[in-house]
């Protein structure tokens, strides 16, 4: 049981409420876009996927971003082997919050320099409402030495790419650590 658990590639999504974390997961898992998903719900999803021709088990934790108790939030963060830091391209406040979310992650994961993290700018389909340019977000990601990907949970643009990239990174790190 323990060995099996260890083989899960564990991903946690973090970001302010309303940025589209639940929609990204539901689109990735079920090819479905849900207009209204329970905003306070934190949930876990598991399945087997094929990465570079190899079957791996994934475990995705959806956080609500409004966990009342720091201990609960930290527990969710501890769970992750890797993280998608998600903000909404049409909402500057959610972009400003990303620093905080990243700091929480780094604190809980003991400043692990090799921690797989990708910055995600979601809702790329809302072109007219965009407030954060690709350049601005990309330069922040570059500063942190992490990739930046723009997604739409509505049109599925880059959704597979974002999840595949983070799971590949998690898999690589786990393999290195096992050696
Ligand atoms: P969460 O709080 O981060 O889990 O956000 P949700 O996944 O619940 O999404 C919040 C709202 O944004 C919902 O009304 C979604 O329908 C909407 N939404 C999420 N992702 C997208 C997207 O990529 N494009 C558009 N247009 N709306 C989105
Ligand atoms: Mg949600």
Image (tube, helix red, strand yellow):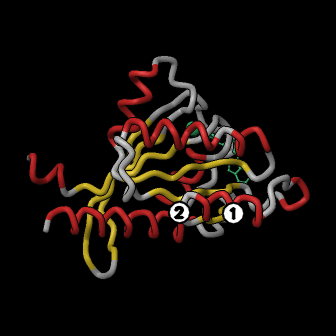
Q: CA distance from mark 2 to mark 1?
A: 10 Å
Helix, strand or loop at label 2? It is: loop
Question: Is residue 133 rendered to the left or right of residue 16?
Answer: right
Query: Whole-percent x and y of residue 100?
Result: 59, 37
Asked if disc 1 is less than 8 Å from ligand 1, the answer is no
* Residue that numbered label 1 is attached to: 139
Location of residue 55 (image quadrant):
bottom left
Helix, strand or loop at label 1? It is: helix
Query: Whole-percent x and y of residue 165?
Result: 46, 69
* Residue that numbered label 2 is attached to: 146
> Does residue 116 sit above or below 43 in this rendering?
below
Query: Whole-percent x and y of residue 8?
Result: 25, 55
Question: Is residue 144 rendered to the left or right of residue 105?
Answer: right
Residue 103 can be seen in this image:
yes
Location of residue 61 (image quadrant):
top left
Identify the image quadrant of the C terminus: bottom left
Q: Residues within 10 Å of mark 2 (few under 14, many from 20)?
A: some
Q: Residue at x 59, y 41 (%)?
A: 15
Q: Residue at x 57, y 65 (%)?
A: 159
> Does residue 42 sit above or below 159 in this rendering?
above
Q: Residue at x 72, y 48 (%)?
A: 88
Pointers 2 and 1 in contact (C-beta within 8 Å): no
Question: Is residue 149 rendered to the left or right of residue 52?
Answer: right
């Amino acid at each position: 049981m323990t060995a099996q658990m260890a083989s899960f590639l564990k991903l946690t999504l973090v970001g302010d409420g309303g940025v589209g974390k639940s929609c990204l997961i539901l689109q990735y898992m079920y090819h479905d876009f849900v207009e209204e998903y329970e905003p306070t719900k934190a949930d876990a999803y598991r399945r087997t996927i094929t990465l570079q021709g190899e079957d791996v088990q994934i475990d995705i934790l959806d956080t609500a971003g409004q966990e009342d108790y720091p201990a609960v939030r930290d527990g969710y963060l501890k769970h992750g082997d890797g993280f998608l830091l998600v903000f909404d391209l049409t909402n500057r406040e959610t972009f400003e919050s990303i620093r905080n979310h990243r700091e929480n992650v780094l604190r809980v994961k003991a400043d692990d320099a090799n921690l797989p993290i990708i910055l995600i700018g979601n809702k790329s389909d809302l072109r007219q409402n965009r407030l954060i340019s690709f350049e601005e977000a990309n330069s922040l990601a570059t500063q942190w030495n992490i990739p930046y990907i723009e997604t739409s949970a509505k049109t599925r643009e880059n959704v597979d790419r974002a999840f595949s990239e983070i799971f590949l990174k998690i898999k690589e790190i786990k393999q290195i650590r096992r050696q």
